[in-house]
Image (cartoon, rainbow, N blue to C red):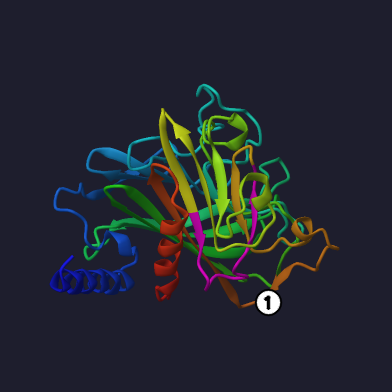
Amino acid sequence: MTPFLRRLNSFLSATVLLIGFQMPIPAFAEAPAKQKTLSVVPTTNPDGWRILQGEDLFAAYLANSGGKPIVYPIEGPGGQRMTRDFPMLDSTPGEKHDHDHHRSLWFTHGDVNGVDFWADDEGSGKIVQIAGEAVVDPKTGNVVVTTKNEWRDATGKRLLSDTRTFTFGAQQDQRVIDCELRLDATDGDVNFGDTKEGSFGIRVAGTMKVDAKLGGKITNAEGLQDGEAWGKQSNWVDYSGPVDGKTVGITLFYHPSSFAAPCFWHVRTYGLFAANPFGVHHFTGGKPTAGVTLRAGTSLDIRCRVLLHQGKFDPEKAALEFAAYAEQAMP
């Protein structure tokens, strides 16, 4: 390469990086001209929104499924269904019908002032959406879903509130969902108990899971794989495997400005994939802690990036993606 081309390469790389830091999802700033645009369509039964790329489904944000908001379905850049269909659908071949509270992509916790929001049993807590909107950002072309929600116990009493902003963006070889959650102690102190049952969860497609023995693999930022990644602290974890004969994957990044970063990971070879900022003792083997108490009138923030990719997982590329994500200024 000539000196001129090297200088040009460096200039272009720096320019793209600077543009990326100014955009909510940096990789989308230089989308190719033929890139299909994103749009959003409201849905009913259940209420929510469908996010489309051109005429292709990207994802749907559902206000209530099993007593909580979820994102389902989720399709990668090649059109493969990336998360498990059950229990929303029970006819997908090869899927195990276990843990029916594992619904595609969700955020809950197993002990909030003693109430279990992770499960969806009769006595479990419910997260109820009370307001929401979905728009296409005119500057970025991304779809932004913003909702306000109340965490209620089995009697209907509100324990806390949250605001969720999910930003959906896409380019040719990957799709991204940026997830920002602000938990507000609107009704007195809130204790998030020390339990492994939480919190930002994904249940991958049945053929992707390690236990399917079809090539599924878990990898964290430290290079630990499969069962060794469970209960470890890390900046990110990838879960990759085959869907419809193609290798695809989900990399989940936990932003360093998020509460308790880097968090522990409740990631299982049977397909569960969860970032847990509140649980400790199940992962470390120590004694139970007092959990995390959010004082009345205060808030905490959780920020995650869900990257849907095609092809074999590249840990070096993931490290660069995380570095760019970590540099973004957050509100």
For badge 1, the amino acid type reads Arg
Image spot of residue 99 (x, y percent): 66, 36
Which residue is at the front of the view, 289 or 262? Answer: 262
Q: Is residue 86 left or right of residue 295?
A: left
Q: Is residue 280 left or right of residue 45?
A: right
**Quick one: quadrant of the N terminus?**
bottom left
Q: Which residues are magenta?
A: 252-268
Q: Residue at x 57, y 59 (%)?
A: 150
Left or right side of 202 for 8:
left
Near-viewer residue (44 or 246):
246
Figure quadrant of residue 246:
top left
The extreme front residue here reads: 2
Vertical position of residue 199 compared to residue 325: above or below: above
What residue is shown at x 40% (from left), y 76% (from top)? 329
The residue under label 1 is 295
Q: Residues within 10 Å of mark 1 (few under 14, many from 20)?
A: some
